[in-house]
């Protein structure tokens, strides 16, 4: 799609909003982009697209990439948005498998200092709990400005480290809704929280990080030739200490205990599994170590090129002097040093699920950044202490196919639902897909997403 010659129509600018109507990516639907100033010193960038189908009734989805430090522009332009990056970052092309086929979607750069979001000096976010509160503040401002979307079913969705972001955001929303039910507050919107969607996420590290050993030694795409060889034996010897340190982190929740757990588990279980000739995100593929910053995909750096185009920034309502980084490595290091990636976010979900909020977890079978592999994801879902626990434990995986295809796209386990409805808890293993399912299997990912938000069984 060609770039506009000038800045698009300014929709609104106040102390809290700076919003434009861009004509980028897709011109057939209504879209908005710009900033909501959630505080005087915090400015969150978003890009919103209405559904291609029925925007007045289709659900509203918040999409967050992970990292930590990963801009949601990567999800938009590389995986599931209405357009895909092309021509070395000079343009975009329409994505026929966009999730906007079925939903209105907010792509949000969060925490602040990710992507085009920014904080003034000293206002950076240090942990996932505070980041979730900022997202809630953003949503309140969004619904204040766009109340027509507040009545729609709302889904919190994200990938990778958003397996931690997502439950934190959903928990803040759910608790705020409980408080509003007891004591309505003028100017506050009750968010119609329908489900949490976690794609190839890291959510319960005490279960998922140890699963690395099973995945790289005994999985369908083993990293090591001999499951009983010295490499796998050494990995197994570190599991018990890793589990103990994560337990101490979640008991004391200090930067010291959690940072220590993170450093130990990463150095003993995660980093040794990263063979230099493998694509971390898809173990079916090789990747030269020199290509690792771009995730071994040639189109990844194109996102940064396009987003830094002066015409694109002007059209999106971004200051021409503000540069875009698709990944904030400084934030990634900061969060990892504090051990944010070993906090148990799964513990936030049972009270939501028991109250009717649905949970979809899916993972590609061919490689999910090691610790986010499908084995560990299925195990933590099995471990969730909800009223559906025994039913889910007894549920057998059922084949799932995309309509019109003779191939099996994956395997699904569900609990709850019934009477023509989808499950309250569903786990899906997606075949022939790595960490980024919507990139690797776009038609299957769209079918899975659409059926889920429409509460249709797989």
Image (cartoon, rainbow, N blue to C red):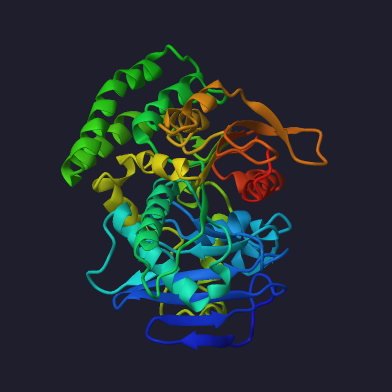
Q: Is residue 302 above or below residue 247?
A: below
For the C terminus, which image quadrant?
top right
Identify which residue is drawn at 30% across, 41% down. 343
Q: Position of residue 105 (x, y in %)?
A: 58, 63
Q: Looking at the image, can residue 458 be seen?
A: no
> Which residue extends farthest front?
182
Q: Position of residue 253 (x, y in %)?
A: 21, 42
Q: Position of residue 357 (x, y in %)?
A: 50, 47
Identify which residue is drawn at 25% across, 31% down. 247
Q: Looking at the image, can residue 296 be seen?
A: yes
Q: Nearest the camera: 251 or 245?
A: 251
447 with respect to 366 (left or right): right
Q: Nearest the camera: 239 or 455?
A: 455
224 with respect to 455 (left or right): left
For the N terminus, which image quadrant?
bottom right
Q: Nearest the camera: 46 or 57?
A: 57
Identify which residue is drawn at 60% across, 44% down. 437
Q: Position of residue 127 (x, y in %)?
A: 28, 54
Hey, which quadrant is residue 436 in on the image? top right
Identify which residue is drawn at 47% across, 38% down. 369
The mark total stands at 0
> Which residue extends farthest top?
228
Hey, which quadrant is residue 173 in on the image? bottom left
265 with respect to 316 (left or right): left
Q: Nearest the camera: 212 or 392?
A: 392
Q: Is residue 440 above or below residue 118?
A: above
């Amino acid at each position: 799609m060609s770039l506009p010659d000038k800045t698009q129509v300014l929709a609104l600018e106040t102390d809290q909003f700076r919003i434009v109507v861009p004509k980028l990516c897709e011109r057939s639907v209504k879209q908005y982009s710009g900033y909501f100033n959630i505080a005087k010193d915090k400015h969150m960038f978003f890009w919103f697209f209405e559904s291609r189908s029925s925007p007045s009734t289709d659900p509203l989805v918040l999409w967050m990439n992970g990292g930590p430090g990963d801009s949601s522009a990567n999800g938009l332009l590389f995986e599931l948005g209405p357009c895909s990056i092309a021509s070395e970052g000079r343009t975009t092309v329409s994505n026929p498998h966009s999730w906007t086929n079925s939903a209105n979607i907010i792509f949000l750069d969060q925490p602040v200092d990710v992507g085009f979001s920014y904080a003034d000096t000293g206002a950076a976010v240090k942990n996932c709990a505070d980041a979730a509160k900022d997202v809630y503040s953003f949503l309140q401002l969004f619904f204040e400005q766009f109340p027509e979307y507040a009545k729609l079913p709302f889904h919190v969705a994200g990938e990778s480290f958003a397996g931690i972001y997502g439950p934190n955001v959903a928990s803040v929303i759910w608790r705020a809704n409980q408080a509003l039910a007891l004591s309505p507050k003028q100017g506050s919107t009750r968010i119609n929280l329908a489900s949490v969607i976690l794609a190839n996420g890291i959510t319960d590290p005490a279960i998922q990080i140890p699963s690395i050993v099973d995945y790289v030694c005994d999985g369908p795409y083993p990293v090591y030739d001999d499951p009983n060889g010295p490499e796998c034996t050494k990995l197994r010897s570190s599991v018990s200490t890793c589990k103990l340190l994560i337990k101490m982190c979640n008991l004391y929740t200090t930067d010291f205990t959690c940072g220590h757990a993170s450093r130990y588990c990463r150095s003993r279980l995660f980093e040794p599994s990263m063979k230099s000739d493998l694509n971390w995100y898809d173990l079916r593929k090789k990747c030269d170590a020199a290509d690792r910053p771009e995730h071994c995909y040639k189109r990844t750096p194109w996102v940064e090129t396009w987003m830094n185009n002066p015409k694109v920034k002007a059209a999106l309502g971004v200051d021409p002097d503000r540069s875009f980084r698709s990944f904030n490595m400084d934030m990634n290091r900061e969060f990892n040093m504090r051990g944010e990636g070993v906090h148990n976010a799964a513990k936030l979900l049972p009270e939501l699920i028991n109250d009717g909020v649905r949970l979809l977890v899916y993972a590609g079978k061919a490689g999910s950044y090691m610790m986010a592999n499908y084995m560990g994801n299925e195990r933590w879902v099995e471990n969730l202490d909800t009223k559906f626990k025994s039913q889910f434990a007894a549920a057998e995986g059922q084949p799932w196919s995309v309509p019109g295809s003779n191939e099996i796209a994956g395997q699904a386990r569900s609990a709850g639902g019934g009477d023509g409805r989808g499950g309250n808890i569903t786990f899906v293993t997606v075949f022939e897909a790595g960490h980024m399912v919507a990139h690797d299997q776009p038609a299957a990912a769209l079918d899975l997403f659409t059926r889920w938000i429409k509460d249709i069984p797989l």
